[in-house]
Each structure stands twice: as C-alpha cells, then as structure tokens.
Amino acid sequence: MKRLLIISPYFPPTNAADMQRVRMSLPYFQKSGYSVDVVAVHPRFSHMPVDVLLTEAVPSAITIHYVNALSSKITSKVGLGSIALRSFQHYKKYVNRLLQEQEFDLIYFSTTQFPLCVLGAYWKRRFGVPYVIDVQDPWHIDYYQDKPKSQRPKKYWFSYRLNRWLEPKAMKSVDGLISVSDTYIDDLQRRYPETRNIPLSTITFGAFAPDMDIARKHAAEFLPLLNPLYKNIVYIGRGGNDMHTALTKLFEGFKLGLETDKALFSKLRLHFIGTSYAPNGYGTPTIKPLADTFGLSNYVIEQTDRISYYHTLVTLNLADGLFIPGSDSPGYTASKIFPYLLSSKPLLAIFADESAALKVLDEYGVRSSHAFSAASPTVVMNFLRGVTTGKSTTVKYNPEAIEKYSAKKMTEAQCLLFDRVLNGKINK
C-alpha cells in the first residue's frame, strides 16, 4: 500500500469549495492502493462556514493531522488574511517532523491556497518525496490586469505580485499536475516548459451520490430559503463581474418573457445565494445591481451570505429549476455542476464557448446548456417558460455519463496519475 500525504488547509467540518475533491475522493483511495493522511488547518483558525454534516462521509480510517495558524486578528492589521500565509510556517514545521518520523511516497496539494505549494519543492529537496499539485483554479493570472480597479479583487496588487513570485518556485520542481481544465495546464506549460515532461491529467470534480442521501436525511434541519408561492430558479455559488455575460443572457430572456406574458413570468423568482467570499454580513452584491438595470428588481433576490454545503443541496432539491452561470474566462469549469446534476432538476447553464463544462453537460444529456453565442433571449425564455408552467420537472440523465463522472472514477484517475509519478521516480 502506497502512502499519500494530502495538503488541504480546508477540511470538514470547514465548508470550502476547494476541499471537496479531497473529501469526495477519500472513500476510494484505498481501493486504488493508497493509504491517506490529510494535513489540514484546524477549523478554529478559519472564517469559512462550518458544516458538521460534511464529516459523515469521511472514512474513519483516514488519519487527519491539524496544524495551527496565526490569528487573523493579528495578521489583518497588516492586510494579510489568507489562511495559506497564516498557516505557512506551521505547515512547514509540522510536516517536517512528520516526514522525519514516517515514510510517505507522495505529497498531494489539493487546494486553492496556492502559496503552500512552494513547500512541495522544499520537502522534495529535503526529504526526496515527490509532489503533485491539483490546479483547481488558475494560480497566477493576468485576467484582471486590464480591468478597472473597481472590478479587481481586494488586495489585488499584493496577491498578483505574490503569485507571480511563488508560482514558478512550485511549478519548476513539481512531479505531476492535475487540473480541472485543459486550459489551465496549457497555460502552465507555456510558462514552464519543464512541465511538458511530467505526468499531466485533466480530471474534473466528481459527482458524489452519498451527499444527496445525507442531505435528504437532514433536510428538516435547514431553514427554507424559497417561497413556495412562486416558481423558484436557484443558483448557489460565487458571483462576480466575470459572470455578467452569462447573467446578461439570463436577464435578457427573463425580460423578454415578462414582455411576452407578464402574468406567467411574474410567478418566477430568481435566487442567487452565497455570492460573496466575504464573511457573512460583509458581502457586496454583484448580481442584483445588474438585474436592476434590466428592471428586474422585484424578481431577483441576491443573498451574499454563504450557506452550508448540505443546506445548498437541500435548497437545490426544493427549487423548481436551476441555473449555472459560467465565467468570461474560458478555462472556468464550475465544479459545482455535479451537485446540480445530482438533484435531477431542470437546469439552464450558460458558459463561454470554449468551456469544458459544456462537454460534460452534453454527455449527461442536459438539454438547456448553451454557449454564450447560442444563448439567445428566446432560448432562455423558453427554458424559463417550461419551469414556470410546470412542464419541466425532474430530469433523467445518461447513466454512462453518471458513472464516468462519479467521484469513484475521478479518484481512480487521480491514482493513475500518482502511479505514473511514482513509476517515473523508480525508473530514474
């Protein structure tokens, strides 16, 4: 049995999107020949929401190590709130001791807290342990360089320069790369020719069916967010100006519906929930202001506060229809598509023409997934009409695609890449 050490700062019960791949993979690693230890930051040092139900699917045999982090009350005084930076020295010290005392075959960074990945190069030099990085999002990007300051993330000046400095330190020594998008890997290969000679694999997040069972079992514990007097279409996830193209397509279709049949379309409400990464109560709406420009103020509800993962699943199950907006960035894949698909509710998805998400949705048999160029107001209006009239209810998807994109299959794919990394090390 090979030993895998996973670096995932966020881990159950902390509710963060970038720990979901690890959480959903844990039940299947052992069957592929890997015993797993996870090193996470203790939840008390995180500002992310807590969802204790997330621990129900974590196998009891998994060893979980917790490290500390600097208090954000201290670091915020100098403008540093990142959990990666606050936990960096704690990770270094703890894992140093762990690697001195125990033998691990491979280190796996599965997180968007990318500054920690430079420790992979350090541990490789010191202990000879290879490492793999899971590129769930781009690390260093130029996307916001030509955007006005009002559209840039907070502390962009600092993060842009930090990422530009740290990324090459990790990528020039990495032994394998996993990514949710071919685009992310292509970009890295252009910047770092060294990565053309290592194992690479594009692996999406998987659909983890046990989550729906957990959600249904605990459904009564969550506060309903939808008004049953209306037909409710729901999107749960981050907002942002980079999604305005997709949102504009949605609002144009809704506005056309109101102009065509106001009595019918007035029964519809569009909900956008958990759209900000800011602590609850401090988020800035990025969707409602756009809806207001279309005259849709009475029909669009944006809640910037995030909700727990299983509250999300329960809300998706209660919705009449679902919507997923894609980013203007073509590499954006929206890993959240799989919980939406598990709900088997009518789904409207609008993504950039080059997005890999469209291929996945097509394989599943989603009838209302559209590229930007094809999402006309009439197409969108017809989807909304189907939900509002009740003609669109539950959906059945392609069973072959369901199996292909299951968390089990995605874990097997990760382990195949790990095997290639380790076989390459042996052959050297």
Image (cartoon, rainbow, N blue to C red):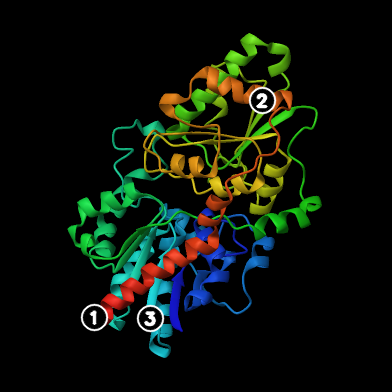
In the image, residue 422 sits, relative to residue 84, either above or below, namely below
Query: Counting residues from the N terminus, which is met first, the one under dot 1 or under dot 2?
Result: 2
- Name the spot of residue 311 as percent of width and height, x first: 69, 49
Residue 242: image quadrant is top left
Of mark 3 and mark 1, the one earlier in the sequence is 3
Give the alpha-carbon distance from disc 1 to disc 2, as whole Å: 58 Å
Q: Which residue is mark 2?
A: 386
Identify whether 22 is placed above or below 95: above
Q: Nearer the viewer, residue 413 or 72?
A: 413
Taking depth in this image into account, of 74 and 246 the one nearest to the observer is: 246
How far separated are the C-alphas under marks 2 and 3? 53 Å
Left or right, residue 226 beside residue 376 = right
- Along the viewing direction, whichever of 274 and 156 lies nearer the viewer: 274
Q: What label does residue 105 carry, if any?
A: 3
Residue drawn at x 64%, y 53% as measured from the top left: 309
The amino acid type found where label 1 is placed reads Asn
In this rendering, position of residue 142 left or right of residue 297: left
Q: Is residue 179 left or right of residue 323?
A: left
Q: Position of residue 295 (x, y in %)?
A: 59, 15
Q: CA distance from mark 3 to mark 1?
A: 15 Å
Residue matched to label 1: 427
Q: Are marks 1 and 2 in contact (CB under 8 Å)?
A: no
Q: Is residue 8 at least partly visible in the picture?
A: no
Q: How would you rate the neighbour count of disc 2 (Cα within 10 Å): few for under 14, some for 14-19, many for 20 or more?
A: some
Q: Secondary structure at mark 2?
A: helix
Q: Is residue 225 visible?
A: yes
